Amino acid sequence: MDKELLNFLLNNEPQRIYKDDKYLEILNKLSEIDAKLQLLLKSKPNKSICEQILGKTYVIVSASEIDPKLHPSLFILDLDGEKVLVTFKDTIELLKMYFMIYKDQVEIKIPRRLTPLFGFLKKNGLIYLDHEDMTYKFV
């Protein structure tokens, strides 16, 4: 522990540092606080759900982790009762727009930012190509 800090805490009475149990208790608490602060500085903070979506286009989380009422701008799609796919509503609307404009050419014309979401939805059977309209549709 830094001597200057101890002097400050003890009102510049360094001779009392080791004489009183109260000051030893203060030293122990300060050591605990220091250890916790060091741990916090080294640990990575958890990103918010929106930051995760911005980084990956979509995330898959446990259904209990998200409340649709708290996030009105999020699109939440139940996958299996326990897990949900979460993305922004605007992203889904943009994907639907590409479905209408490019019809069966979506795979070629879709922007790279939407490719992971499109691939996931297609691979898991959440969208399909309607052969009558030749457009992709959600299940």
Image: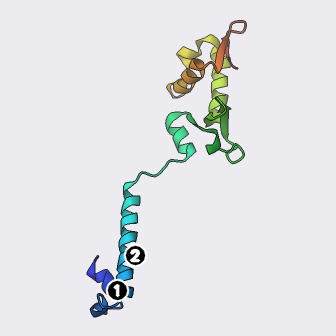
Up/down of 59 relative to 30, above or below: above
Report whether 131 appears left or right of 6. right
* Nearer to the camera, 27 or 75: 27
* Distance from Cα at disc 1 to Cα at disc 2: 16 Å
Report whether 71 appears left or right of 35. right
* Nearer to the camera, 116 or 13: 13
Query: How many discs mark residues in the rendered view?
Result: 2
According to the picture, the residue beneath numbered tag 2 turns out to be 29
Circle nearer the viewer, 1 or 2: 2
Up/down of 2 relative to 74, above or below: below
Residue 100 figure quarter: top right
Report whether 65 appears left or right of 8. right
Q: Residues within 10 Å of mark 2 (few under 14, many from 20)?
A: few
Badge 2 marks a residue whose secondary structure is helix
Up/down of 97 relative to 53, above or below: above
Residue 7 rendering spot, x and y as whole percentages: 31, 87
According to the picture, the residue beneath numbered tag 1 turns out to be 8
Badge 1 marks a residue whose secondary structure is helix
Residue at position x 56%, y 18% in the image = 123
Q: Residues within 10 Å of mark 1 (few under 14, many from 20)?
A: few
Amino acid at pointer 2 = Lys
* Nearer to the camera, 114 or 124: 124
Residue 13 rendering spot, x and y as whole percentages: 31, 93
Amino acid at pointer 1 = Phe
Q: Earlier in the sequence, mark 1 or mark 2?
A: 1
